[in-house]
Amino acid sequence: MYHKIQENIDSHLVNATPKQFESQLKYLKRYYKIISFNELNNFKNIKKDSVIITFDDGYINNYEVAFPILKRYNSKATIFLTTSLINKKDFLTKNIIKQMSNSGIEFESHTLTHPDLTKITPQELDKEIYSPIKHLKSLINKESKILCYPYGLYNQKVIDAAIKIGYKYAVTIDFGLNTSKTNKYQLKRMMMNPEENLNFFKLKLTPLWSLLRKISHGVIKDD
């Protein structure tokens, strides 16, 4: 998962430089199958080497820097939009979103205003996750079916609300690989880090790295 792609990496929202992102994308195109959420279909007939590229929030940087690289490699990607930020400074505009959507980029929901969904009322929760569905339908004539939890925070109340509204999947910032057994409303992702080189990027995509993380975090213990 990414937020911004840029040369200056002084912000925690910058996940790669343009050169790093292109190297990562080139590697993924060669050794993995880049798919979209529309192709998931409850993980039926999905190969183990499938990946989905995601961007959170909807920064204008995604269009100015990442989009040309994605087009160069004919690659799919999904941008999770915080819809109240559309047309705001440093964020994507309506016209750009339409252009990117027409070029094959998926747009999905990252809520209306990016709150901690676990700390708001049921009425506020419904508004936060339903409003983007209406906004995206009117903007690009596609209904959002994927929810991205702001800050990666969720609980059963949030999951139940997402199911009630009609979302098919929801993504977290929990690290790991997804399988057919993964909860559809707790899909894991891997945050990219500009301080990690390409070899480390390759390692993060393997089951070995997920296992090592579990061991280091005490999830797996010796008997």
Image: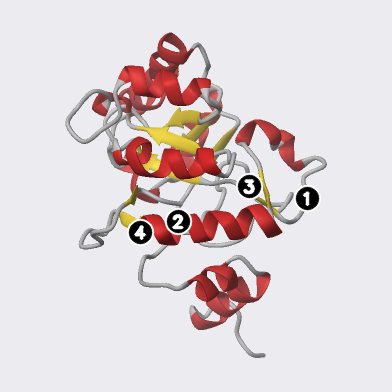
Task: State the image quarter where residue 31 is shown.
Answer: bottom right
N-terminal of the pair, mark 2 or mark 1, is: 2
The reply to whether residue 149 is visible in this rendering is: no
- Closer to us: 71 or 210: 71
Looking at the picture, which amino acid does disc 4 mark? Thr
Question: Of tags 1 and 3, which is closer to the observer?
Answer: 1
**Residue name at image x 38 percent, y 15 percent:** 135
N-terminal of the pair, mark 3 or mark 2, is: 2
SS assignment at label 4: loop
Question: x%, y% of residue 63?
Answer: 36, 35
**Residue name at image x 42 percent, y 35 percent:** 80
Per the model, the C-alpha gap separating discs 2 and 4 is 6 Å
Residue at image mark 3: 183
**Residue name at image x 42 percent, y 9 percent:** 138
Which residue sits furthest right?
Answer: 45
N-terminal of the pair, mark 1 or mark 3, is: 1
Residue at image mark 1: 47
Looking at the picture, which amino acid does disc 2 mark? Phe
